[in-house]
Amino acid sequence: MESFTTTTPLWRWQPATAPAAWFFLTIDGDVADGIRFAAMSGQWLDKRGGFGSARVAVTIGETRWQTSVFPHKESGGWILPVKAAVRKAEGLAEGDEVTVTVSL
């Protein structure tokens, strides 16, 4: 299993018409390139999803879960949603620098 680790700020997105917000990490630079290369070289095999997403295992601190990363046009990298249970377990808030490991 190939893994990539980066540290990036947690950011919030909230549409004007919805009461709820979503939180993400942007994975860009060399780490994004490594994930893209792994995807192109077939290491994901059957793990590709809608919107160009890919299934991954993610670790932040002591918390590990299965999710997807999504292509992010603005950065040329990927975005990773971080659910409330993970934020709570790891004590994360908007703007925090988060070290994340994404495993294929």
Image (spheres, rainbow, N blue to C red):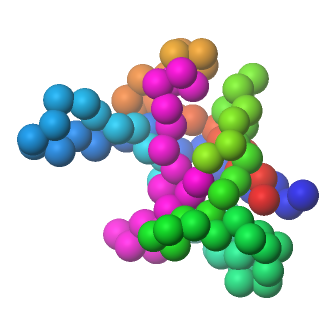
- The quarter of the image holding the C terminus is bottom right
Q: Is residue 67 left or right of residue 19?
A: right
**Residue depicted at 52% across the width and 73% down the height:** 52
User: Would residue 47 be counted in the magenta stretch?
Assistant: no
- The quarter of the image holding the N terminus is bottom right
Q: Is residue 85 left or right of residue 45?
A: left
As displayed, is residue 78 above or below residue 83? Answer: below
Q: Is residue 28 left or right of residue 75?
A: right
**Residue depicted at 79% across the width and 73% down the height:** 45
User: Would residue 74 be counted in the magenta stretch?
Assistant: yes
Q: Nearer the viewer, residue 31 or 53?
A: 53
Residue 34, quarter of the rendered image: bottom right
Residue 101 seen in render? yes
**Residue depicted at 68% across the width and 43% down the height:** 66
Q: Nearer the viewer, residue 35 or 54?
A: 54
Q: Is residue 30 left or right of residue 71?
A: right
Residue 74, quarter of the rendered image: bottom left
Q: Nearer the viewer, residue 73 or 31?
A: 73
Give coordinates of residue 2: x percent, y percent: 85, 60
Give coordinates of residue 100: x percent, y percent: 66, 42
| View extreme (right): residue | 1
Residue 61, quarter of the rendered image: top right
Give coordinates of residue 60: x percent, y percent: 67, 33
**Residue depicted at 57% across the width and 25% down the height:** 86
Which stretch appears magenta?
Answer: 68-87
